[in-house]
Image (tube, grey):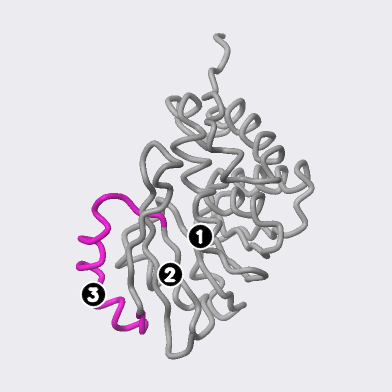
Amino acid sequence: MSEIQIETEPASAADIAGDRIDVLREFAEDLGRRGEELGLIGPLEPPRLWTRHLLNSAILAPLVNRDARVADIGTGGGMPGLVLAIVRPDVSFKLIEPMERRCNWLNDQVDRLALDNVEVLRGRAEEYHGAFEVDQVTARAVTALRKLVPLTAPLLRDGGEMLFLKGSSVQEEIDAAEKALRKHRVREIAVEELGSGQLTETTRVFRAKIGTHG
C-alpha cells in the first residue's frame, strides 16, 4: 500500500491559526492519514487537505464572536466545527453530526487534542430544536440555504447569527431561499469573501442574523 501524501502545510497556515497551529497540525496529520479509511474524506483529499478543508474552515474564525456559544451542523470529519474549536479555544462549540462513526472520530479528536470547549451531539439539527439556544451557527457543505435555514434558525437565540461556508452559487441559493428567509425572520444578509492574500481561493460566507435584536 502506497504511503498517503498529505499536502505540505501552506505558509499562511501559521498566520491563520496563530498560537494554535501545533494543535491544528496534529489534527491535520491524523485526518490526512486515517480520513479516507474512516470515510471522512475522499481519496483525492489528502493532497489538498490544508487548502481545501482546514484553512477553508479556519479562515472563518475571526467572524466567531468572543466567548460565543456556537453550534456546527453536520460536522462530518470536523469541518468547520472542530477546526474552529481548535483555533478558537475561547468559544464553546456543539458539534451536531448524525453518523455514529463520525461522532466517534470527533470524540476521539476532542480527547486526543485535549479540547475542553467541545461537545459532540449525535443526531440531526432538527432533533435539538428547543433543547438549547446558541449565539452563532455554522455549516459547510450540508445543504442548500432553503433547507439549511429552517434547520438552523430554531437553534439560534433572537439576534443570533448564521455563518455558512458556501460556493460560487450562493446568490442563487439566497434567491431560491426567499420564502424560508422571510419565514424565519432572517435579516442583514451578506455574502463575504475571506482569505484574500492568504488562501489560493477565497472562501465565501453567507452571513445573516435572525429575529429583531442585535
Q: Is residue 49 left or right of residue 178?
A: right
Q: Amino acid at mark 1?
A: Ile
The percent coordinates of residue 171 (x first, y second) are: 23, 61
Is residue 59 in the magenta section?
no
Instruction: Name the residue furthest bottom.
Output: 212
The secondary element bearing badge 1 is classed as strand
Residue 73: which disc? 1
The percent coordinates of residue 101 (x first, y second) are: 61, 43
Where is mark 3, residue-wise?
178
Which numbered disc, 3 or 2, marks the residue that appears first in the sequence? 2
Where is mark 2, residue-wise?
151
The secondary element bearing badge 2 is classed as helix
Q: Which residues are magenta?
A: 165-187
Query: How many callouts does the rendering have?
Result: 3
Q: Nearer the viewer, residue 181 or 213?
A: 213
Q: Is residue 169 left or right of residue 156?
A: left
Residue 129: which disc? none
Q: Residue at x 43, y 69 (%)?
A: 151
The percent coordinates of residue 22 (x first, y second) are: 71, 37
Within-10-Å neighbours for mark 3: few <14, some 14–19, many 20+: few
- 9 in relation to 65, above or below: above
| Label 2 to label 1: alpha-carbon separation | 9 Å
- 113 in relation to 26, above or below: below
Q: Is residue 125 left or right of residue 176?
A: right
Is residue 178 in the magenta section?
yes
Instruction: Name the residue furthest top.
Output: 1
- The answer to whether the residues at label 2 and label 1 have Cβ atoms under 8 Å apart is yes
Q: Nearer the viewer, residue 164 or 203?
A: 203
- The answer to whether the residues at label 3 and label 2 have Cβ atoms under 8 Å apart is no
Which numbered disc, 3 or 1, marks the residue that appears first in the sequence? 1
The secondary element bearing badge 3 is classed as helix
Q: Amino acid at mark 3?
A: Glu
